[in-house]
């Protein structure tokens, strides 16, 4: 997520590439949670996509800046998402 040129004090609005990377990381963690069993990758991706989009909406609502988001790191952000993953 460091390839951006956006103002670090602007609200966190990820690029399409950043969003896709976030979804990929979240989908990996979901797959890991289910032991990487065969046949669940598509569902993992869809759950991750819904969760990341909900997380990003909450971040926008709270007024989190790009600098604050990057400081917290994606792994910490995903911990916040755990309550959402039941979607």
Image (cartoon, grey):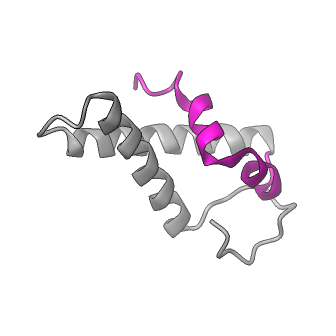
Q: Quadrant of the N terminus?
A: bottom right
Q: Is residue 9 left or right of residue 6?
A: right
What residue do we see at 67% from left, 70% from top? 2
Is 78 within the magenta?
A: yes
Total numbered badges shown on the rendered structure: 0
In the image, farthest residue toward the left: 39
Q: Position of residue 30 (x, y in %)?
A: 36, 35
Work out whether 34 lies above or below 19: above
Is 30 within the magenta?
A: no
Q: Quadrant of the C terminus?
A: top left
In the image, farthest residue toward the right: 9
Work out whether 71 lies above or below 80: below
What residue do we see at 44% from left, 43% from top? 26
Q: Quadrant of residue 47?
A: top left
Q: Is residue 55 left or right of residue 62?
A: left
Q: Nearer the viewer, residue 86 or 79?
A: 79
Work out whether 22 lies above or below 10: above
Q: Position of residue 36 (x, y in %)?
A: 23, 37
Q: Position of residue 75 (x, y in %)?
A: 59, 42
What residue do we see at 37% from left, 45% from top? 28
Magenta segment boundaries in residue numbering? 64-87
Q: Nearer the viewer, residue 46 or 41?
A: 41
Main SS category, magenta section: helix
Q: Quadrant of residue 86?
A: top left
Q: Quadrant of residue 78?
A: top right
Q: Position of residue 77 (x, y in %)?
A: 63, 39
What residue do we see at 45% from left, 49% from top? 25
């Amino acid at each position: 997520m460091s390839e951006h040129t956006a103002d670090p004090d602007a609200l966190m609005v990820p690029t399409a590439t950043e969003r896709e990377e976030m979804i990929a990381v979240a989908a990996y963690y979901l797959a890991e949670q289910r032991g990487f069993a065969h046949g669940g990758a598509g569902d993992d991706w869809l759950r991750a996509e819904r969760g990341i989009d909900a997380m990003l909406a909450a971040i926008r609502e709270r007024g989190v800046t790009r600098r604050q988001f990057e400081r917290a790191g994606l792994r910490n952000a995903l911990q916040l998402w755990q309550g959402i993953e039941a979607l």
